[in-house]
Amino acid sequence: MRAFLEVFKVSKSFGNYQVLKDVNLLVNRGEFVALVGHSGCGKSTLLSIVAGLLPPTSGSVILDGREVNAPGPDRAMVFQNYSLLPWLSVWDNVEVAVRSALPNLSEKELKDRVAYYLSLVGLYEHRYKKPPQLSGGMRQRVALARAFAVEPKLLLMDEPFGALDALTKAVIQEELLKIWEDKRLTCLMVTHDIEEAIYLSDRIVVMSNGPAATVFDILEVKLPRPRNRLEMVKTAEYAQLKEKLLYYLTNVLRKVA
Ligand SMILES: Nc1ncnc2c1ncn2[C@@H]1O[C@H](COP(=O)(O)OP(=O)(O)OP(=O)(O)O)[C@@H](O)[C@H]1O
């Protein structure tokens, strides 16, 4: 059986600089996969290639049996820097995305869906505001609501919680897991936060340092679901994963400045 997402020998160069070399990765339908690695190793580049926003120099990406060579409504991406339309209200930022990805929804379904996801991220009361009137964390929550609302087959996230305070981050991570389980989404997420990677993922992909970065190792997270953060941190499985990831990132893949 084929995997839902297949990344085959993907390499990417910008001019003479080779960012990625022969990246291979298979992601099953419904899986949650985190991507970790040092800054600049090419995680965002890989995500953009999977999103169809950037062509690989060689290799290919197959999603649900079809080659990816452009963005599509089956994928949604949450960027580090929110990427909202500043002239539109919070509501309209979400509505425009849903309308364009799912043109067949009725007006009622569309409005219900926008309201539901804005409430979920705690921004329904702020729906008439425009992005410049929001804090960084609020903007990121709009970007998340916009991606969730499309209910894409593949949700791609580039450090989506990096700008959030610890409390908001914990709440939204839990909501993300609920949506992921409920809608059977497949998620690929870049993160620098080891605890976040363990809490959310089924597998953690560790990238080697660039240039010519590739998959260094893949760790399986066998913690049962639903996960409870407080219980999780007391388990031997969590301690072992954390130690291994720290060892990789601070010793084996130590960045020499
Ligand atoms: N459009 C581009 N043109 C030239 N070089 C680029 C371009 N995009 C990325 N790069 C280079 O590719 C390398 C990988 O960048 P990328 O943003 O993918 O890394 P990253 O692992 O996501 O980093 P971080 O964790 O800091 O976000 C970097 O050296 C970057 O300078």
Image (tube, rainbow, N blue to C red):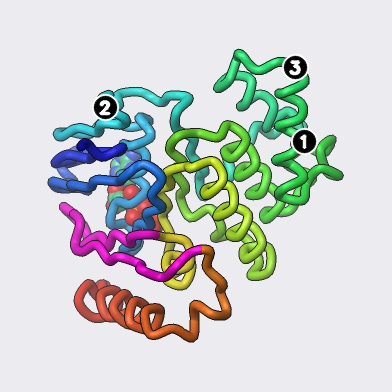
Under tag 1, what secondary structure? helix
User: Residue 144 lies in magenta, yes or no?
Assistant: no
First in sequence: mark 3 or mark 2? Answer: 2
Examine the image and state in which quarter residue 63 appears: top left
Say if disc 2 is inside 8 Å of ligand 1: no
Which-is-in-front pick, marks 2 and 1?
Answer: 2
Residue 115: assigned label: 1
Q: Residues within 10 Å of mark 3 (few under 14, many from 20)?
A: few
The picture quadrant where one finds residue 105 is top right
Residue 99 or 159: which is nearer the viewer?
Answer: 99
Secondary element under disc 3, as helix, strand or loop, is helix
Residue 24, given in percent of the width and then of the height, sits at 18, 47
State the residue at coordinates (58%, 59%).
173
Spatial CA span between label 3 and label 2: 32 Å
What amino acid is labelled 3 in the image? Glu
Density class for disc 1 (Cα within 10 Å; few <14, some 14-19, many ≥20) is: some
Badge 2: residue crowd in 10 Å (few <14, some 14–19, many ≥20): few
Residue stretch rendered in magenta on the structure: 202-225
Q: Which residue is mark 3?
A: 107
Q: Position of residue 209 (x, y in %)?
A: 22, 62
Q: Is mark 3 within 8 Å of ligand 1?
A: no
